[in-house]
Image (cartoon, grey):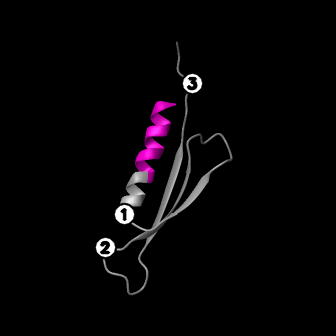
Amino acid sequence: MDQEERSAVLVVRLWREPGAERSAVRGRITMTADADEAASTKTAVASGEEILTLVRDWLNEFSSA
């Protein structure tokens, strides 16, 4: 049985706030688990750990569908 071809999109934009310590990072993540659909999720994040968690969850969702 052939698997249907799928694609997904994840864009991460990162920045540091002026005066923030070097390890402090903020970001905005735009993602969709199905690039053929117009729907996407936009999320603001305030730490590197949040970024990693969202990317990991997105990858797991895509991989398991």
The residue located at (55%, 29%) in the rendering is: 5
Q: Kindly identify the amino acid type of the residue bearing the numbered disc 3.
A: Glu
Q: Is residue 63 magenta?
A: yes
**Which of the numbered marks, if any, corresponds to residue 62?**
none
Of mark 2 and mark 1, the one earlier in the sequence is 2
Could you tell me which secondary element the residue under label 3 belongs to? loop
In percent of width and height, residue 3 lies at 53, 21
User: Is residue 19 positioned above or below 65 on the image?
Assistant: below
Residues drawn in magenta:
54-65
Q: Kindly identify the amino acid type of the residue bearing the numbered disc 1.
A: Gly
In percent of width and height, residue 27 lies at 47, 67
**Which of the numbered marks, if any, corresponds to residue 48?**
1
Label 3 – label 2 distance at C-alpha: 41 Å
Label 1 – label 3 distance at C-alpha: 34 Å
Decide which of 33, 43 is in the foreground and name it.
Answer: 43
Could you tell me which secondary element the residue under label 1 belongs to? helix
The residue located at (68%, 47%) in the rendering is: 38
Q: Residue furthest top?
A: 1
The residue wearing badge 2 is 23
